[in-house]
Image: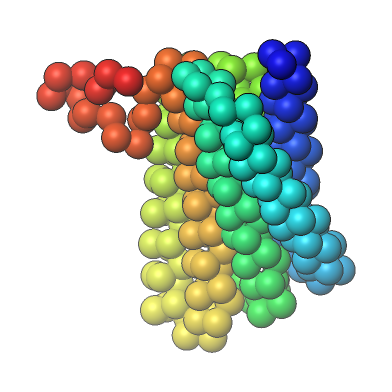
């Protein structure tokens, strides 16, 4: 019985890493569609979206069947719940990638109000977060949550800086309003991908340490709640 459960868990972990790889590719293609003005990549992102959604449904069903058949407790139950949360976040990253790719259709690179290198810098930081989050999930590395929290602060700062510059550009050059608005939505979607990556790392903390960082007590008010 224990060996059967271990097999079930390994299948779920494999599904997460497969889905994570698909989402990473989808996000990279979406940003490239905007950065390079390559509309052919939009179709590839939409194809990726269908695969991600299918894997999401299949893995969620597998999680529910495993809980019903094995009735896991303690860390085993926390791991399955973490899988459910993780695939939900991965699916939402896929949604954000789709939004980014579709915005490429209304962005004229010749009239873009900011350098695309700035978008690439922000997206590269977020891709690193996503890669680190999936790696933390695989290795049960609870320390990654702290690192991703710091990187998320960097991403937030870049988002605020880019949006401020885009807003200022719209005021100074009215002809850039349309591409600037589209890029604001792109920047916001990139930032949300970072948020989802941070969430995944926090689920690992819950599996390993039994602490739910979503409801952690603020610093200075008595520490983290006990599990």
Q: Looking at the image, what colour scheme do you see?
A: rainbow
x%, y% of residue 140?
59, 17
Q: 148 above or below 181?
A: above
194 left or right of 1? Answer: left
In the depicted view, which residue is nearer to us: 202 or 96? 202
x%, y% of residue 210?
41, 20
- Residue 55 shows up from this direction: yes
Q: 222 above or below 113?
A: above
Q: Residue furthest left?
A: 221
Q: Indicate the quadrant where residue 134 lies.
A: top right
* Image point (44%, 25%), residue name: 206
Q: How many badges with numbers are in the image?
A: 0
* Image point (45%, 72%), residue name: 169
Q: 86 above or below 141?
A: below
The quadrant of the rendering that contains the N terminus is top right
Q: 8 above or below 177?
A: above
* Image point (56%, 28%), residue name: 71
The quadrant of the rendering that contains the C terminus is top left
* Image point (50%, 81%), residue name: 177
In the depicted view, which residue is nearer to us: 175 or 100? 100
Q: Indicate the quadrant where residue 21 lies.
A: top right
x%, y% of residue 37?
77, 68
x%, y% of residue 84?
58, 41
- Residue 118 shows up from this direction: no
């Amino acid at each position: 019985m224990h060996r059967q459960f271990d097999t079930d868990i390994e299948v779920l972990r494999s599904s997460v890493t497969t889905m994570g790889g698909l989402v990473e590719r989808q996000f990279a293609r979406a940003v490239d569609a905007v950065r390079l003005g390559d509309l052919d990549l939009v179709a590839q992102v939409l194809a990726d979206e269908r695969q991600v959604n299918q894997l999401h449904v299949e893995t969620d069903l597998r999680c529910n069947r495993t809980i019903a058949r094995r009735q896991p407790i303690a860390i085993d139950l926390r791991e399955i719940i973490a899988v459910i949360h993780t695939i939900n976040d991965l699916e939402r990253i896929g949604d954000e990638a789709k939004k980014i790719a579709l915005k490429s259709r209304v962005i004229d690179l010749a009239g873009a109000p900011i350098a695309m290198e700035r978008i690439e810098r922000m997206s590269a930081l977020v891709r690193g977060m996503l890669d680190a989050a999936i790696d933390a999930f695989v290795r049960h590395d609870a320390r990654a949550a702290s690192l991703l929290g710091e990187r998320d602060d960097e991403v937030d700062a870049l988002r605020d800086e880019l949006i401020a510059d885009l807003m200022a550009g719209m005021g100074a050059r009215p002809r850039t309003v349309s591409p600037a608005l589209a890029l604001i939505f792109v920047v916001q979607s990139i930032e949300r991908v970072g948020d989802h990556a941070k969430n995944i790392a926090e689920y690992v903390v819950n599996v390993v340490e039994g602490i739910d960082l979503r409801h952690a007590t603020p610093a200075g008010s008595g520490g983290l709640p006990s599990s």
